[in-house]
Amino acid sequence: MLEGLQQLMDLQVLDAELVSARDEQSEIPALREKRADERSVAQQKIEAATGLTQSAEAEQRRVETTLQDQEALVEKLEGQTSQVKSNEAYTALLREIEQAKESISEAETQILEGMEKIEEAGATQRRAEAGAAAVFKRSEAEEKACDERERALAARIAELDGARSETTARVPAELLEQYDKIATRRRPAVVAVNAEICSGCRVDLPPQLFVELIRAKSLIQCGNCHRILIHERNLQST
Ligand SMILES: [Zn+2]
């Protein structure tokens, strides 16, 4: 009987796990990047909200300065009323005082509106900070779990690679070469058979082929899907 049939099946089990472990491993960088993006979006929201608060506060300071300037102006102009010599000059002075008072009134309205804006911006900022804190916390936990999973995968892959080397050493080169060739196109590349039908593609096997399969003197492949066929009776647990 052909050597290495059971080992070929064992190899296939190892390879199936290797493929899925490597697939999972290859997805890790994208997952890390996605989390980094989420953190960056959360950070940007904080910065945008902080910027709004700061500009609302700066605008408020500007209006407060205007208010003070206009109040000083009114005081100064009112001080001049007793010194004007003509009616015309007196009327002009009163008009100037009136304008300054209008400016004061406008500034006071703006300050009230500004207080609302600052309050809203502050609330937005606090929401952004709370949202970001949740994102960072979750992200950190996921990152930690991801690190652990990555280490476990690397260890398991090294283990599987070792087992694969040991197993391939016990499979004849011709069998191995054929297996590798098929496995790049379809998995499983080798199937156990217990009736006159390919368990890979469900196509009937010619009686002569089935006889050869039981004798297992040479490598037998399905005429339809080309998978390597092994009769169950020629497999023994290792
Ligand atoms: Zn087949």
Image (cartoon, rainbow, N blue to C red):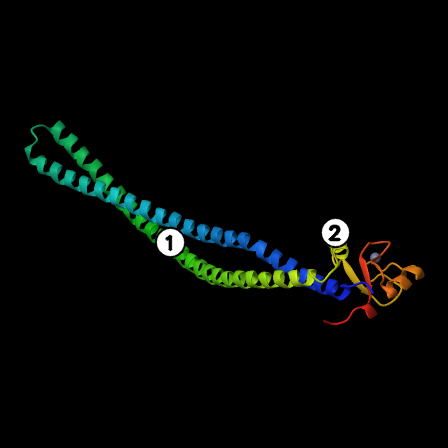
* Tag 2–tag 1 contact (CB < 8 Å): no
Q: Which of marks 2 and 1 is in front?
A: 2
Residue type marked 2:
Lys
Query: Which residue appears at 45% of the width and 58% of the height?
Result: 135
* Quarter of the rendered structure image containing ligand 1: bottom right
How many labels were placed on the picture?
2
Q: 143 or 154: which is nearer to us?
A: 154
Across and down, in percent, residue 171 comes to: 73, 61
Query: Which residue appears at 27% of the width and 42% of the height?
Result: 106
Looking at the rendering, in which quadrant would you find the N terminus? bottom right
Q: 199 or 124: which is nearer to us?
A: 199
Q: Seen from this angle, which residue lies furthest right?
A: 207
User: Few, some or many C-alpha atoms within 10 Å of disc 2 (few <14, some 14-19, many ≥20)?
Assistant: few
Residue at the disc numbered 2: 181
The circle on residue 110 is none
Residue type marked 1:
Gln
Mark 1 Cβ and ligand 1 under 8 Å apart: no
Across and down, in percent, residue 132 comes to: 42, 56
Quarter of the rendering containing residue 60: top left
Question: Label 1's element?
Answer: helix
Residue at the disc numbered 1: 125
Q: Which badge, 2 or 1, comes first in the chain's sequence?
A: 1
Please give left or right for residue 106 compared with residue 69 in the image: right
